Image (cartoon, grey):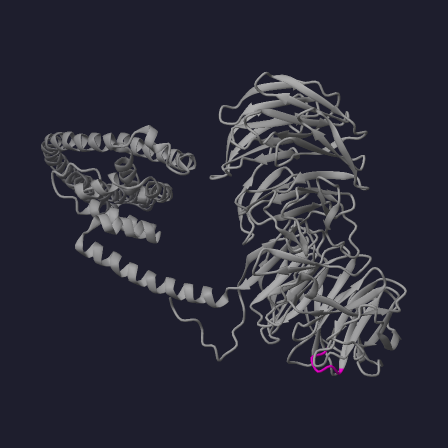
Amino acid sequence: MAAPPPQGKIHLKTSFKSTQTIESIYTGGKVCISQDEQYLITTVGEDIDVIEIKTGKKLWRLKGDTEIITTFAVTPDGHTLVSASRSLQLKTWDLRTGTLTRTLKAHDAPIIVMAIDSTSTLVATGSADSTVKVWDIAGGFCTHNFKGHGGVISAVLFHPDQSKWWLCSGADDCTVRIWNLKTRKQVAVLESHVSVIRGLAVSNSGNSLISGSRDKVVNVWDLTAMKLATTYPIYETLETVGILQKSAVQTIGDKDVSDKEMFYTAGDAGIIRIWDLRSGELIAAQKEEQGSKSGVSDVIYNTASQQLVSITSDQNILFFDIERDLKRVKQIVGYNDEIIDVAYIGEEETHLAVAANSEQIRVFNLKEFECDLVYGHSDIVICLDRNTDGTLMASGSKDNTAKVWTLDLENEDADERYKCIGTCVGHTEAIGAVALTRKTDGLLLTGSQDRTIKCWDLSTADLEEPDENLRFKSHYTIQAHEKDINTIAIAPNDKVFATGSQDKLAKIWNLQEGTLVGTCKGHKRGVWSVKFSPVDQCLATSSGDRTIKLWSLNDFSCLRTFEGHTNSILKVDFLTSGLQLVSCGSDGLVKLWTIRNNECVTTLDNHTEKIWALAVRKDENMVVTGGADSMINMWEDFTELEYAEQKQAKADLVLKEQELSNYLQRKDWKNAITLALSLEQPFRLLQLFNQIQQDRPEHDASVTGLEAVDKVLRGLSLEQIGKLLGYVRDWNTHAKNMRAAQTVLNAILRDRKVQEMITVPGIKDLLDGLIPYSDRHFQRVEALSVRSYVVDYTVQAMDLMTLMGSMDLEEDEEEDVENVNSKAYRKREEERQAKERHDAFAAARSASTTANPSELKASSKDSESMEDVDGDEGDSDEEASEDEEDEEEEEEEDSDEDMA
């Protein structure tokens, strides 16, 4: 691969991609863990997710049928999953491939509970129609249908002793019934509870059955006598019970339990308890989390690791080690509510702190599939901040307090990783912004909806032995804005800080004294975020008016305005040593800006709702965003990688083009066509086919002009045929390329069957583009063929007229001779008559000299009349001569035409 750009120079970032996401994996309902403890199967609305527990990688998402999943179960061998939904469908899935294998209708009402026997062959389903059915998983048919309960079935369990073939069921009619699968009859009805049965379990010996109910007691039944043996009060509404393997755990904490048979319970109190089955003595109890208000809906017993996994009502999955006195060793957050704020923490920034519309701060380990809950606040946490080295974290909440935490993320004990070192009490309304100083850890700024800013002195905190009850003292209090304060940022040199408020203003303050330094006016809506440049004397602000403004800290004037978002811009931060900006907004988009030219370089889109949170890692190679869609995206910088890939791609393209030229030179048509297809060069292919047609040898019987090319086209794969047909479709739209297009199309379709061609990708669209133009080309060829007959007719007519023209030429020559003779004769006659008139006129003039005057006058009159006559005759002579000239010209023209 080509080397990345030189590292000595700062290069602008142009490309980010979402490489990791943290999203909801559990929205409530059933949860299972495979028997080998490798996979976690959870309900996500109408779908089921299969996830690797160690890495968090999602293997499969089993798509539902638009109805909520009510329950599911996994076979002990881990190969099959059986699910049920409100659509009354019972579905069987192959977990090895993630595919659906069978669907059938099981009950007349939704299935509520489900259990699979130890042989992975039978599944029992309990429904709201008060019936219990047993199904053969492989065959997909019902083997048993038990009726007798008077209410919704709430628990089912196969007896672990296969020799007995018993099935136990409980319902909201407060009874437990035992069914014999061999005789298909009811064995016993156990009555003692006064509320719905929520859990059933069989002892290790197989002689006792325990049942847990919402009546806050656990009953132990003697399966030999089929009667109640004892009752243990639990004092909480139970949701689940179970039996621990005997002798699998030797000690719990400092207690020896090697000879005890124990069972566990959990319910609305939100804690797991372990009891002695013989005496009912409480052996161990989970440590109650401070501020936790969630109950437990189910508990999973991992026999290999001897862990109890608690499924809480707030969609958290907690792992407890039995031997370590139910100490929490792992936690998975199943559902994140609206993400309000995020912050990188830790010296190596390997963890991400998240405020997710809850009282707890969620800390995600970005390397492992694990999350810690930090308890302390009594109301929703709104804002977070960390110090420069990531060892301190501050949080602000709707409980009007801010807390400061010391972090030891490498500690194996989850309780020792996060310690509250003090609380800031003094605001009268919710705290919406917090900021820790950058150079030192001595001050904390808080901004509240009470429109004040407080500066807290943290020097009194003891980091070695922190006291969570310590209350920090306020250094000063400022009435800063006229409306809610949304954001606070401290300058890198710790000299000034900036605040943004809903009053449309951003203000600059002196950190030590709390005095106002300047005000930035210009936004038309409230200011949501402020951020100082790491290198320049400027401040960036984002507002609800859909703009980002860059302000000078010298005169507080607006230097630049960035427009591009279509809704409120909620966060902004600097990148690339202050040369670029990154922003997110209510339009669900993340935009990267270059400050120098006000240009939006790229837009990142992987959220479906508004993005509240944005954080940049110190090395600026990773940007994290979180929004109202409960999703957290990790955007990684791919600029250098794409630059190297583009450079390598250009080099590879040059080499391949040279190879293509070499193939064409050597007339290696197979490799040339294949390489041209891979390079997606339709013009080179068109030239190739045209050249082959031009060089077609005589008496060649191939389709394309060379038999070798026909053979290459016959050997193309379906994918290559689809690509080539796409080129043919484009060529076929131009009449000048029609011949090559139709030739290639003929070669492709000639030796292939219809069944093979219909499997070509996109064949329907290709045919829709080929057929109309092909019809048009054939119509044009047919019309040209018809017009070719006119040429034949014209040639034949010209031959006939040539023959007739030779005969007419002889007749015209004879007529010309006769016309010349007649014209000479007429001309001689006219000359003779003119001479006679002239002689007569001369005789008359000589006779007039001897006559009298009267006769002279008469003779003069006669002479005048004679002259008139002569004049008329002269005019007629002139006209005759002109007529003769016209006739001669016409004759010459006729002769020219005849010659032509």
Work out which quarter of the rendered image holds the N terminus and state it.
Answer: bottom left
Q: Where is residue 478 in the image (x, y as percent from the top left)?
A: 88, 75
- Residue 220's quadrant in the figure? top right
Residue drawn where x is 25% and y is 51% of the image? 672
Nearer to us in this view, 239 or 735: 239
Q: Position of residue 466 (x, y in %)?
A: 76, 72
Image quadrant where residue 832 sits: top left
Can you see residue 814? yes
Task: Report the number of numbered marks.
Answer: 0
Q: Dividing the image into 4 quarters, which one contains the C terminus?
A: top left
**Residue 808 location (% of width, % of height):** 13, 31
For the record, the magenta segment spans 491-495
User: Which residue is at the front of the view, 647 or 167?
Assistant: 167
The picture places residue 40, in percent across and down from the top left corner, at 58, 45
Q: Can residue 106 be seen in this view?
A: no
Taken as a whole, is the magenta stretch helix, strand or loop? Answer: loop
In the image, residue 144 sits, relative to residue 295, either above or below, namely: above
Q: Is residue 47 above or below residue 304?
A: above
The residue drawn where x is 23% and y is 30% is 789
